[in-house]
Amino acid sequence: ADGAEGDVELAAARHQPQGLAQLQAQTKFSKRELQSLYRGFKAECPSGLVDEETFKLIYSQFFPQGDAAAYARFLFNAFDVDGNGAICFQDFAVGLSVLLRGTVQERLNWAFNLYDLNKDGCITKE
């Protein structure tokens, strides 16, 4: 019962995410985990896309003390791998997979990308 419904649910977004099988192949999440992540993603952003302002609002809920806007911008840019100004479910799932289940090298590469703001291959003191 879970299989067909999950595929239909995953394809129902206004922004059409990749198929469940393709996302499973790209991530280290199970089908059930991806379905659960997708439900949460859609609850926060029904359109299927998260812009930077929405991301900052969501992120600030987790860090209510202080202004987390600058760091949220860095995180947003790290998740928005194609640089189109929006995070789709695929971007979110792939990034989260690296952060939670990636090898040490994959996580280091992701973190480096987070701090390499101008994408020149170097992290400067500034």
Image (cartoon, rainbow, N blue to C red):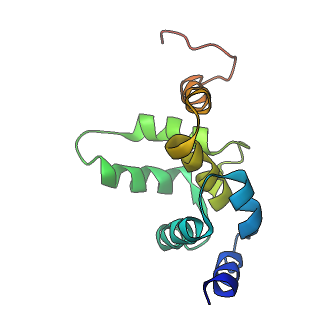
Residue located farthest toward the bottom when viewing the structure as drawn: 1
Residue at x-position 32% and y-position 55%: 61
Quadrant assignment, res 88: bottom right
Q: In the displayed structure, would residue 92 be above or below residue 71?
A: below
Percent of width and height locating residue 22: 77, 62
Q: In the displayed structure, would residue 122 be above or below residue 19?
A: above
Q: In the displayed structure, would residue 93 be above or below residue 77?
A: below
Percent of width and height locating residue 17: 72, 66
Residue at x-position 57% and y-position 58%: 50
Q: Is residue 4 left or right of residue 35?
A: right
Residue located farthest toward the left when viewing the structure as drawn: 65
Q: In the displayed structure, would residue 120 be above or below residue 71?
A: above
Residue 18 visible in image? no
Percent of width and height locating residue 24: 69, 60
Percent of width and height locating residue 51: 57, 55
Residue at x-position 71% and y-position 60%: 23
Residue at x-position 52% and y-position 65%: 37
Quadrant assignment, res 111: top right
Which quadrant of the rendered structure holds the N terminus?
bottom right
Residue 13 visible in image? yes
- Nearer to the camera, 12 or 29: 29
Count of marks, rendered view: 0
Q: Is residue 76 left or right of residue 17?
A: left
Quadrant assignment, res 81: top right
Q: Is residue 22 left or right of residue 67?
A: right
